[in-house]
Amino acid sequence: MISQFFVLSQRGDNIVFRDYRGEVAKGSAEIFFRKVKFWKEDGQEEAPPVFNVDGVSYFHVKVVGLLFVATTRVNVSPSLVLELLQRIARVIKDYLGVLSEDSLRKNFVLVYELLDEVIDFGYMQTTSTEVLKSYIFNEPIVVDAARLQPLGPAAIFMQGTKRMPGTAITKSVVANEPGGRKREEIFVDIIEKISVTFSSSGYILTSEIDGTIQMKSYLTGNPEIRLALNEDLSIGRGGESANDYRSSYGSGAVILDDCNFHESVRLDSFDMDRTLALVPPDGEFPVMNYRMTQEFKPPFHINCLIEEAGHLKAEVILKVRAEFPSNITANTVVLEMPLPKYTTRASFELEPGVTGQRTDFKGANKKLEWDLEKFVGGVEHTLRAKLTFSQELHGEILADSKEI
């Protein structure tokens, strides 16, 4: 049961606010933003997604720089509320086409209409874009997406001047082209989150991919769609190692540890030819989520060298190389490295003449941060950091360096 829902900008401006039950004070948005902005509890740098202040539970998720927040005084499932916030953001994006502060302000009537249908007196009703079409009558005011800075996963890589994989999904599900024409389009994106742990000598210790196949359809008549996957796709390791799989299935095999599908997907022929059949609902939705730990070549290779540089001092040499082709550029790359807990100061030295790079020492949680605005494929960058400690570490430097 939700008492309030509101959306805040990065500056703390209240863009959308809906009080469903009147159980929480009106100043909750200000209390929430002040708490999140100055969060310093337990050495954490950022506030957790759920916390309690004076008997009020605050739940929040960050979507494209906007804070979607719900409050309540009763005991509810945190995962349920966080999932609801994600779905509300997705529904609003489906109807507005572009999710941004500007689009929310220009379409506030439509947004409030959606919120009143999604939640009634604090209870969730539906988050289906298709079902909501029967109850929503306002047309969206189109916002130009070309001048907006994309913040989602699709904005990370660019090939030449073309962004990868595709950020054209910025059209409302209810708006037509000029002249009343209906677009016959469908967009499919594959978004993967890669987690790799390197040793201090540059060897890969663990590697994992969490992926999603996202789809957004503008096809009329709800036709059935068939999505063909790799025929060599295999699901489940069965206790065998990656080397055993390569010898059994060949070098081109793709082995997923586990996966799940959207409720609209039919798996009648999936076991035979790895084909998914579905009637896509309106709006953006995940066709398939998957996880794999099969050995793969990561997009970046990291090598770290740590040497003692005198009494209570050490020097870190951090090298990162882009392992993708030179015609691809990665945007907004952030490297974080944990440091010993007794680190008090860090000074940085970048390569001569380099631009678009920033360094920072996060003293609260003892880590260094290296931001690279653009990273061209095939290029290697180096960072030198000089660390100062408050006391002797007795070999802790080398021990921590193995956890990069």
Image (tube, grey):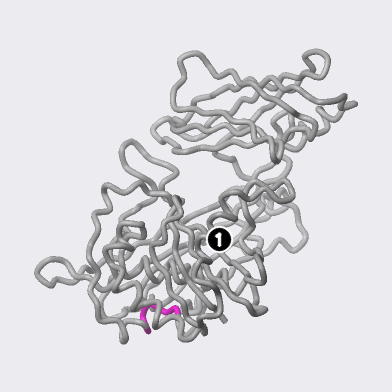
Residue visible at 51% across and 80% down in the picture: 22
Judging from the image, what secondary structure is the residue with disc 1 in? Answer: helix
164 lies above or below 272: above
Magenta includes 129? yes
Position of 186 with respect to 316 (left or right) is left
- Using the rendered view, name the quadrant where residue 177 is placed: bottom left
Residue 243 image position (x, y, % from top left) = 72, 48
Looking at the image, the residue that sits furthest to the left is 179
Question: Does residue 326 show up?
Answer: yes
Report the side of 221 relative to 293 (left or right): left
Quarter the C terminus occupies: top right
Whether 68 is among the magenta residues is no
Residue range of the region highlighted in magenta in the rendering: 127-131
State the count of labels: 1
| Amino acid tagged 1 | Phe
Evaluate whether residue 64 shows in this view. Answer: no
Residue in front for this viewpoint, 386 or 187: 386
Judge whether 17 appears above or below 103 on screen: below
Where residue 170 sits in the image (x, y, percent)? 30, 59
By secondary structure, the bulk of the magenta-drawn segment is best described as helix
Left or right? Give the position of 120 relative to 360.
Answer: left
Q: Position of residue 303 (x, y in %)?
A: 66, 28
Q: Nearer the viewer, residue 70 or 368?
A: 70
Q: Which residue is mark 1?
A: 32
Residue at 81% x, 28% y: name it.
397
Point out the image quarter for the N terminus. Answer: bottom right
Q: Position of residue 140 (x, y in %)?
A: 25, 69
Q: Closer to the camera, 340 or 104? A: 104
